[in-house]
Image (cartoon, coloured by chain):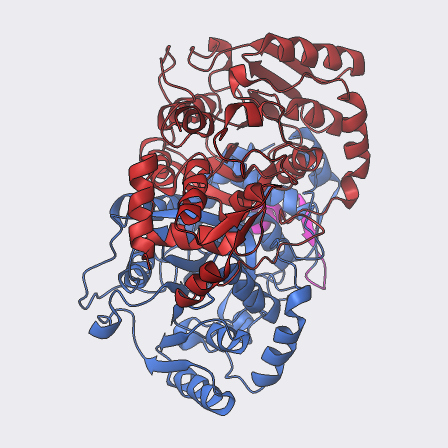
Chain colours: A blue, B red
Amino acid sequence: MESLQDIAHQIYQRTGVMTSSKDVEKILSAAAATPHFWEIITLSQKPFSVVAEIIELLRQKNLLEVDKNGDIKFNSKGLEYLVSLKIAPKRTYTCHACEGRGINFSKLEDLIKKFDQVTVNRPKAISDYDQGFVTTQTVVGRIALLAERGDLEGKKLLVLGDDDLVSIAAGLSGMPTEIVVMEIDDRLVEYINEVANKYNLPIKAMKYDFRDKLPEEYVGYFDTFITDPPETIEALEICIGRGISALSKEGCAGYFGLTSIEASLEKWNVFQQILASKFKVVVTDIIHNFNHYVNWDYLLNTVGKQYEFVQVEPKLNWYRSSMYRIETLKDSKGIENEYKPCELYVDEEALIYRGDKA
Amino acid sequence: MESLQDIAHQIYQRTGVMTSSKDVEKILSAAAATPHFWEIITLSQKPFSVVAEIIELLRQKNLLEVDKNGDIKFNSKGLEYLVSLKIAPKRTYTCHACEGRGINFSKLEDLIKKFDQVTVNRPKAISDYDQGFVTTQTVVGRIALLAERGDLEGKKLLVLGDDDLVSIAAGLSGMPTEIVVMEIDDRLVEYINEVANKYNLPIKAMKYDFRDKLPEEYVGYFDTFITDPPETIEALEICIGRGISALSKEGCAGYFGLTSIEASLEKWNVFQQILASKFKVVVTDIIHNFNHYVNWDYLLNTVGKQYEFVQVEPKLNWYRSSMYRIETLKDSKGIENEYKPCELYVDEEALIYRGDKA
């Protein structure tokens, strides 16, 4: 029977994504715990293409079967294979009360209700800007996190890209003194300004592409930024670099999500080198699965059309990311305030690119 | 009235610890939320010496008062000062169910009970090795975290220093195939081996000082290590470097606690540079306040004897640390396997050193 190392090597050849035998092991352990493809991604936190190709490879090797509903099940040969490798079904111990975020929502119930009411007519996620917004629990969890860390109350907040409508939740919380949204999608700019006017929230939204320089008046202006960057290295560097440039001094904070679904841990390492050595900021928190994304309409039209086990409606909000908090130090610095061309969305780890290509 | 910047500068001169105006702000915000010195540290997560000196300075400036119980209270002048700086009492939103760790303990109740029974006669924490062990919830939370991340079941675990008795909890969980404890304190080596024998756990404890080279047979041997390192940069580098050297290949994991009470964020940044660039490992998780330490007997004999607000019995397990998880990549490497002399415990941020000096 095939070794994990052999499988890892074949997957690397098929996907171009660096894959280790431990990665394969984690995906097998996840697949042993659930028959649902999207949950295997959630449990293993590995790139879409890697997970899909491993399932496909195991099917070709006759170790698992896919039924007419797209459910994935190891057959007896497959189960023996797992035992021979000492791979057990993945265990989970996630707190039900807080979905693992560590945050008590009881003081936040009013904000949750208000946010849902106010944003009921929000614009739909569209693929043009790689959109996909987070759940209300996530948005309000972010507000609590920023507030608990002392980064919200009485502060000036920059939201760099806001399909999640964090600005509105922050405004409704009553805590920040000023909120600026810079957003590329006209629909969102307009929507956020409308809501801000209607509810008298201290928010100003403007059109902005983060490849462009920051408006001069906002360089070194804010206490806190939050963003949900595209996950190529270039985009991460520019987006977070802009955020840091917008902060006023040491002890300011930045928040952003990063997946291991579209960004391998190799990429995380490169990015952590940039954060620590180039930007000289400190990472104070990395909270696993903090951000849960609402399943977006265009998913099954854009990925994995050739696999019937992929072409099933997700039964859970499967796409999740870790929440990073960074803090500026005495010598922190962002990027030069000038136009920076960059590839935003496409590399070999990206969800859509692989789907298209495969 | 004094600016935050002025206070920060004075505190830096008094303590030698880099202090920003945001640090001062966070300590004032914490002090506005509780009268109890040890809780101010917990809420602000700043170095002991910095917190103590700020409280002392504010008292000298007649902005707060300390009553006969050691309780700290802003007077009316102090409250006006806070308002003028727009500093609000610190808010907390920590999940009660999981104490913010994100872990559901309901599947772990048996393990909690068993661990408490088995370790009831554990050795006391002593200052010789900077000991102070964590709560049972913390130990069992660690077991759940390692298990959920796929780093425990069927794995070989190294525990590098084990006054927390993580090895015993891991053994009782039944998940690891092999557990090796390397520990400097003879009392603990003996105790852990006794318990392992009595309960037939797959644990072997041996005497080891992490400045010494690893036993050759354990280089590249383990799947996972866990440790609670002393917090000088040198000690962090050597201790975590040894752990990485003991791991077998990419995709292996290391866990360790790091405080911001004894390690400033400037130090965190230096250490993160080492992790990302020198060791080429990736940080996958930093979980705030994951580790709660049981108050140790020798505390009030070793710190802050000159402040009556420090000389009060802590009302909570005030000393906490963030839990780091790192994962090895293709090019990760630890340190050379040779003797490394280093200063373990003492630098200007350390708890005991400042207490002695101040």
Percent across and percent down for residue A115 are 59, 78
In this rendering, the answer to whether A275 lies above or below A161 is above
Q: Residue at x 62, y 57 (%)?
A: A103
Query: Range of the magenta residues?
Result: A55-70
Instruction: In this rendered view, identify the residue nearer to me: A312 or B218.
Output: B218
Percent across and percent down for residue A265 are 43, 45
Instruction: In this rendered view, identify the residue nearer to me: A294 or A309.
Output: A294
Instruction: In this rendered view, identify the residue nearer to me: B248 or B125.
Output: B125
- Residue A293, by quadrant, is bottom right
B3 left or right of A45? left
Can residue A305 be seen at all in this image of the molecule?
A: no
A218 left or right of B102? left
Q: The N terminus of chain A is located in which quarter? A: top right
In this rendering, the answer to whether A88 lies above or below A354 is above
Can residue A34 be seen at all in this image of the molecule?
A: yes
Percent across and percent down for residue A248 are 29, 62
